[in-house]
Amino acid sequence: MTTSLTLAPTPVVRRWRPRPGAIVGAVMLGTVLLLTAIVPLLPGYDPMGQDLRAALLPPLADPAHPLGTDALGRDLLSRLALASAVTLGMTVLIVIMNAVLGSILGILAGYYGGRFEAFITLVSNVTLAMPVVLLLIAICAVLRPSAGLTILVLGCTWWVGYARVTRNIAATLRRQDFVVSPLTQGADSVWVLTRHILPNVWPHTLIIAATDVATIVLITSSLEYLGLGVQPPVPSWGSMIFDGQRHLAGDPWLALLPGVVMLLAVGGVQFLSQQFTAETRGGLLRKGGMR
Amino acid sequence: MLTFIARRLALAVATVLAVVTIAFVLGRATGEPGALLLPDNATQADVEALNSALGFDRPLLVQYLDTLVGLVTGDFGDSYRLRESALGLVLERVPATIELAFWAFLIGLALALVAALTIQLSGSRVLRAIVGWAGALRQSVPDFFFALLLVLVFSVLLGALPSLGRTSYASLVLPVITLATGQFVMYLRLLDAALSEQAGQDFVRTAIAQGQRRSTVLFTRMLPNAIVPVLGMAGLNLGGLLGGTVVVEVVFAWPGLGKLLTDAVSQRDFPIVQAGLVFVALAFVIVNTAVDVLVRRIDTRTAAA
């Protein structure tokens, strides 16, 4: 007589495995980051220097200018590297400003409630109901356009998403035992907020920030395209595309190259952030019945 | 329901007030128009005469209240440069912008609906992956760069479509494609998420188990539920669509509101900027409020929240 033992299937070690999209994203973003890091070290790096005798060189024509030159004979590779550093730097700063501002406002509103919460809710609702991009264009255009102004204006106005999410979390946590009990033992609000609320909130902030990067890059470069933001001679993706637009018929690479770099950066960030917000959606009305 | 509408209206009024206030502050932050408008060799007396003619010598509070009264009576003053009613100039440009936004919205939403339903009916992972990747790529470039790519292919290389102006129906094609693809990606994501969530519900499984056809279940049970959140987002998204239209109008030299506003901003013609911003805000708020009330009527579950 044999005892039949039904063995559970060998446990598969659940490893963290990156989705294919994440690898593609990392490669895309990595390319742009490498570009900004390595090009300034090259001997030919000169994003501002004009050379009208070498204007509008096509890519790969001259070893001194691997990606060619623009209408003023400025080296395109150098300008792309600087533009990427400028736009990405501005974006990171803007996202951090909004994440910090929005999270602080949201946490305080959710934790303390009352009039402050009502005020923050009103401000976020009003902001959500406004054509914000249009207003940003107006604000940046009417005041003297500069990189600093764009950072300041965008950095102080795009926080509603953070505030709404963190407010909800903080409002839920406020009633939990582990938040209430230190208070009964004499801990002050600062202790509770930093030790108990913040650690539960910041992962959510991080997720919003990751998806926000792409949005902010697109808005900043739209402003740059309209001539608001980084001012010449400092290059930016948006202004390089705007300049290249005039040469679209004869020298399309002038507009295409900055666009491709932007596509690599923004697409890379998007594919990477999908790794965090990965949902598994199966085929729904598949053959063979419902999932 | 009535309290909800009342609260929603109060929010709408607060929003318009906020936009008016921002526009007013911006108008004053640029300095007095006399110095900006008159040539450099104008005398001090000329500058002051113009400022007082435009009402800039009055106390700020009076000017602000005057702006608010103008908002109600529809009087935003005359354009500094064209000496015409600013609101009239704005209204003149509105049809061109609405034309772009309307077609972009309609085509984007219709294509998204078709694509989302096809994905659900076929259950094809490959199709969803392809559409997902293409959408992510589209969302990785701003409207103005996608517009340039279209111009490069269809105007420069093929010579098939006009790249500038508003001369014929053909000139609608490229700007509308630019905006509609952006709309398409967003609505497809929303619809796919909503339909996928519906597909896991018990009532859907029951209907399938009873032997109802999958297409019947999809169209009569899942779609009506899935469309509601998309409708709500569509209202909020109108602001984004209008912002995108501004940039696209600049790329294609489309004679709409966005072109008028960006030109007015660079010429410091502030009555136009003010009238334009307030008009857009009003349109946006009205649509938003209407959509909110509509969603609430359709989906009674939101009334509980």
Image: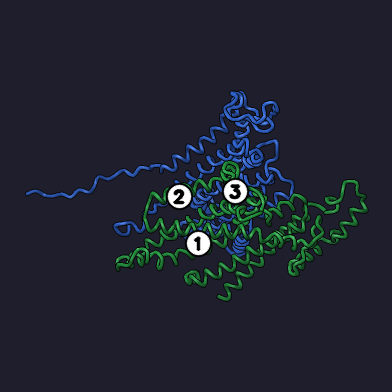
Residue farthest toward the bottom in the current orientation of the protein: B2
Residue carrying label 1 = B230
- Decide if residue A50 is on the left or right side of residue A206: right
| Residue A93 location, quadrant | top right
Which residue is at the front of the view, A53 or B75? A53
**B230 in relation to B179, above or below:** below
Amino acid type of the residue that numbered disc 3 sits on in the rendered structure: Leu
Letter of the chain that mark 3 sits on in the rendering: B
Q: Which chain is blue?
A: A
Asked whether the viewer can see residue B111, the reply is yes
| Residue B155 location, quadrant | top right
x, y percent for residue A64: 61, 24
Residue carrying label 3 = B161
Q: Which chain is green?
A: B
Amino acid type of the residue that numbered disc 2 sits on in the rendered structure: Gly
Report how many numbered discs are placed on residues in the image: 3
Query: Whole-Å distance between the Cαs marked 3 and 1?
Result: 33 Å
Placement of the C terminus of chain A among the 4 image quadrants: bottom left
- Label 3 neighbour load within 10 Å: few <14, some 14-19, many 20+: some
Q: Nearer the viewer, mark 3 or mark 2?
A: 3
**A189 in relation to A254, above or below:** below
Residue occupying the point 64% across, 64% down: B283
Residue carrying label 2 = B132
